[in-house]
């Protein structure tokens, strides 16, 4: 009897423990359902594709490669007269002051033309003076009734014709003197002889090229700037030309090309750089970047 009571109590105790475990499990499950689920990790949402297309991209770099130096001024000088080159007064690379003679053309023929024009003028002036005296005499004779009106008018007409011939002769003399002066081909501005197109004793025709002259006291650094970087190179802004061995040189954006190349999407930019110390040479290449 005693043994039965012990077994009964033991079974009852086990049933109570089992019921308590079931109740606890039910409460835990219910509380988990009330809490929001949290992810194991978080990450930002991917960017909107349409926003990235509409947004103007910034330039990946402020440096533009491939800038080449060009002279501030240049000219190809030709001869205004035909003839033979007698002398080149300067060699390639020489500095020539403005107005100095660079090439001397043969001038004998043009000097002879000028002299002939002068002699023609002298003879016409003498003839005109004689005709004027004759016309005055005709006028006096006509007043006395010793000649006709027609003779007087003919004398006056001869004076007018001779005056026209004299005027034409003076114009021809001016042209001959211009040709004679043009035999000395001068530098249009102070600069260096870049290239000679002809040689001494060579015959040339009018308007044939003789030499190239360049002014390198200032230089243009010319670069093809990508469209996205053009705001950094607006006209009037300061920019820097960088050469691999000569260093950095500051200048100002002086000119901009009118059109954007449809293939390369670039525009020509001209940065004017002072070069009074001749630290740079035209044809050098480097890079451009904004100064500020």
Image: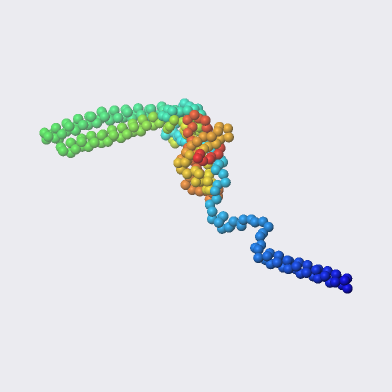
Image quadrant where residue 108 sits: top left
In the displayed structure image, the side of residue 264 where residue 73 appears, left or right? left
Residue drawn at point x = 64 percent, y = 55 percent: 43
Image quadrant where residue 166 sits: top left
Q: Say if 202 sits above or below 31 in the image.
A: above
Outermost front residue: 2
Image quadrant holding the N terminus, namely bottom right
Residue 282 in the image: state x and y as whole percent.
52, 34
Does residue 120 show up? yes
Which of the two residues, 184 or 44, is positioned nearer the viewer here? 44
In the displayed structure image, the side of residue 33 where residue 5 appears, left or right? right
Residue drawn at point x = 85 percent, y = 72 percent: 5
Q: Say if 61 sits above or below 31 in the image.
A: above
In the displayed structure image, the side of residue 21 where residue 70 appears, left or right? left
Residue drawn at point x = 18 percent, y = 39 percent: 150
Which of the two residues, 239 or 254, is positioned nearer the viewer here? 239
Residue 125 in the image: state x and y as whole percent.
26, 29
Residue 261 in the image: state x and y as whole percent.
52, 48
Q: Say if 290 sits above or below 92 in the image.
A: below
Which of the two residues, 234 or 80, is positioned nearer the viewer here? 234
Image quadrant where residue 117 sits: top left
Outermost bottom residue: 1
Residue 142 in the image: state x and y as whole percent.
14, 35
Which of the two residues, 228 or 260, is positioned nearer the viewer here? 228
Residue drawn at point x = 55 percent, y = 39 percent: 287
């Amino acid at each position: 009897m005693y043994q039965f009571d012990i077994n009964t109590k033991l079974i009852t105790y086990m049933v109570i423990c089992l019921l308590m475990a079931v109740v606890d499990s039910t409460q835990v499950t219910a509380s988990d359902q009330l809490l929001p689920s949290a992810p194991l990790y978080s990450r930002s949402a991917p960017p909107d594709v349409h926003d990235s297309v509409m947004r103007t991209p910034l330039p990946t770099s402020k440096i533009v490669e491939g800038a080449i130096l060009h002279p501030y001024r240049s000219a190809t000088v030709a001869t205004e007269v035909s003839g033979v080159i007698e002398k080149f007064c300067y060699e390639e690379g020489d500095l020539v002051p403005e107005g100095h003679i660079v090439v001397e053309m043969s001038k004998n023929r043009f000097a002879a033309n000028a002299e002939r024009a002068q002699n023609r003028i002298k003879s016409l002036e003498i003839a005109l003076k004689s005709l004027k005296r004759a016309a005055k005499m005709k006028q006096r004779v006509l007043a006395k009734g010793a000649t006709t009106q027609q003779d007087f008018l003919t004398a006056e007409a001869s004076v007018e014709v001779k005056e026209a011939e004299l005027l034409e002769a003076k114009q021809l003399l001016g042209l001959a003197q211009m040709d004679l002066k043009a035999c000395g081909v001068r530098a249009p501005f102070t600069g260096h002889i870049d290239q000679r197109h002809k040689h001494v004793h060579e015959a040339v025709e009018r308007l044939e090229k003789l030499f190239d002259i360049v002014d390198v006291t200032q230089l243009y650094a010319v670069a093809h700037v990508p469209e996205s970087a053009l705001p950094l190179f607006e006209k009037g802004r300061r920019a820097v030309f960088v050469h691999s061995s000569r260093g950095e040189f500051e200048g100002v954006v002086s000119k901009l090309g009118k059109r954007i190349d449809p293939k390369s999407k670039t525009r020509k930019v001209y940065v004017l750089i002072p070069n009074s110390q001749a630290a740079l040479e035209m044809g050098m290449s480097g890079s451009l970047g904004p100064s500020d």
